Image: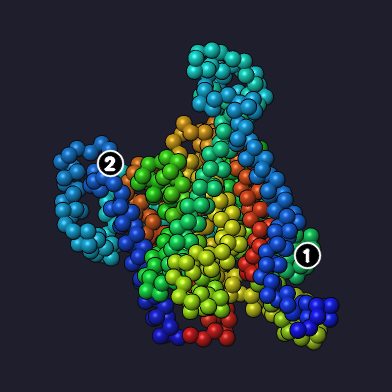
Amino acid sequence: MLSFLWRRLLSTIPVLLIVAVLVFGMLRLTPGDPAAMLAGDAASSEQIAQIRTGLGLDRSIPEQFGIWFGRMLTGDLGESFYYKTRVTTLIGQRIEPTLSLAAVTITIAVVVAVPLGVLAAWRFGGWLDRSLMAFSVLGFSVPVFVLAYLLIWLVSLKLGWLPVQGYQRIGDGVGLWLKHLILPSITLSVIYIALIARVTRAAVLETLGEDYIRTARAKGLPERAVLLRHALANAAVPIATVIGIGIALLIGGVVVTESVYAIPGLGRLTVDAVLARDFPTIQGVILLFSFVYVLVNLAVDLSYVVLDPRIRY
Amino acid sequence: MAARRDWTPTDLAALSVESATVVPQSSAWSRVRASWSVRIGGLVLVILVAIALLAPWLGTVDPSLFDPASRDLLPGKQGEITTLEGETLKHTFWMGSDSFGRDIYSRVIYGTQVSLVVGVATALLALTFGIVLGLCSGYLRWLDGPLMRVMDGVMAIPAILIAIALVALWRGSLLTVVVAIAVPEIPRVTRLVRSLVLSIREEPYVEAAISLGTPTWRIMVRHILPNCVAPLVVQGTFICASGILVEAILSFLGVGLPPDIPTWGNVMAEGRAQFNEYPHNIFFPGVFLAVTVLAVNILGDGLRDTLDPKMAKRV
């Protein structure tokens, strides 16, 4: 087990290294002077020259990558040209809203999608099953921001139940925090629910065809126990996998949702950085998001041991 | 030699095994045509293509025309619009007007052109690169490892972030937006093609071709590629749907196509500031966008169920 953990951890290193190369390469592959581009449109030629020496752009490309990568390893993501602060500080300031949004969204998605998927598989071909499949196609098709505005219009403007936009720190009171997060989280969770429910349904449907389900029913086990302890428990691995893969969707959704609901998180930071062509910040945020994505999927891989005791590494 | 009339139906069935590879192809096509998902999705798409092609004749005006006197009109209101020649025309704003006095209806109808072009172009581009890379990776062992590691790296970066970053670097135009949306899709196509190649290359007919001394490129093009068509068509449909969606997201965030190009995302981006008073500026393009993506997705589902039953079981 320990040796597997070690090997699995090591196997993420090449992926992260390639991500770093790609993010670095994106800036270098574009036509034009990277220093001028980094400096922005309003920079003077001295500033550009300063940046050039600062970044070591007079050296060879592999050398440049080495320097940049070395700095990154020590947690130095450079300085934002737009906000004039360290990118790491900037990320630190913006991480709470995004983490809150992601946590509430994942909670809603799992709590809604898994039971729905199990019930749909249990009554395969029934009305719930068919409406769930229709909902999942719809969920993949309705753009996050259209749904966001629809919900704002209905829940906040027409009914006046929840605040329209904004974010309250969790330190200012959990009630207020949750009130501002409910609508964005519901918006963001729809596509995630569609994905998880669909996979749960397919996985449970497969286990329901197994012999041990027939045995469980034959020995008179209540249907609830059959579904939860036998069918769902054996379908746990693909469900965990899709929750991990779905993090990529979630990150994409965060960028859009935070913009619509005016939440000052990492997604909003990404869009602002792109609009300001603030490349160090863009690099930093992409690296962070990719790092999180790889780590979450590593955690999912490790969770297989708990979810399915037959799996031993 | 046995006379033909002595053959039993079993014998005939045994003989027809050789032609069995032909039979599923024709029945696959009839299955596709019989599928309700394909019919409904296809019909909606045909209507949308017609709207895109007939845009100038659907009661629209030039989508870039504006008139300060017709600002912020509600849907269905009468107003006026000034042409480039300075003529002022009476015009009914079926979907209202934006804060510049432009006709939302015209912008939405012309936006159909942009969305469909982006969707199809993205799918074709991603498929082309994915097929080439996938064939190389599946067939050239020495290239497989390094190439797939790079693809793993690309897949570890959330798709929308790649697209946003690339557009930010290149600045938005139709070409850059299409390329930026296609790039993150390439690894998925590559992986699909690679896995298909790995299973097909073990087939006896490929072995036979190799032993006959057929050059590698010919085996790829003549024997392997035709067997990848069905899953690739399905995959292409889904890329098309997500391409349309991502283009709208980019334009909506203000990092996509330039604001003067009428796209659904741009119309919605312009409607954001006045959403409280004029929600229709977001809802009309939003409905068009959702219906288009839904139609492509339904078509894709139908194609997957009929053309690629193995994949249908996996999802």
Query: Does A296 sit left or right of A126 as displayed?
Result: left
In percent of width and height, residue A99 lies at 47, 58
**Label 1 environment density (alpha carbons within 10 Å; few <14, some 14–19, many ≥20):** few
Q: Residue at x 60, y 59 (%)?
A: B234
Query: Does B282 sit left or right of B22 as displayed?
Result: left
Q: Residue at x 71, y 81 (%)?
A: A210
Which quadrant of the figure contains the C terminus of chain B?
bottom right
Q: Chain of mark 2?
A: A
Q: Residue at x 35, y 46 (%)?
A: B169
Dots 1, 2 in contact, CB < 8 A: no
Q: Which mark is residue B212?
A: none
Q: Could you tell which of marks 1 and 2 lies nearer the N-terminus?
A: 2
**Label 2 environment density (alpha carbons within 10 Å; few <14, some 14–19, many ≥20):** some
Depth check: give the residue in front, A302 or B250: B250
SS label for mark 1: loop
Q: Which mark is residue A40?
A: 2
Q: Residue at x 61, y 48 (%)?
A: B293
Write down the quadrant of residue B14 in the picture. bottom right
The residue to which callout 1 is attached is: A125
In percent of width and height, residue A258 lies at 49, 48
The residues bearing labels 1 and 2 have C-alpha atoms spaced at a distance of: 58 Å
In percent of width and height, residue A260 lies at 52, 43
On the same chain, marks 1 and 2? The answer is yes
The amino acid type, in three-letter code, at marker 2 is: Gly
Q: Chain of mark 1?
A: A
User: Looking at the image, what colour scheme do you see?
Assistant: rainbow
The amino acid type, in three-letter code, at marker 1 is: Gly
Which quadrant of the figure contains the N terminus of chain B?
bottom right
Would residue B82 be seen by someone viewing this image from the given angle? yes
Write down the quadrant of residue B89 in the picture. top right
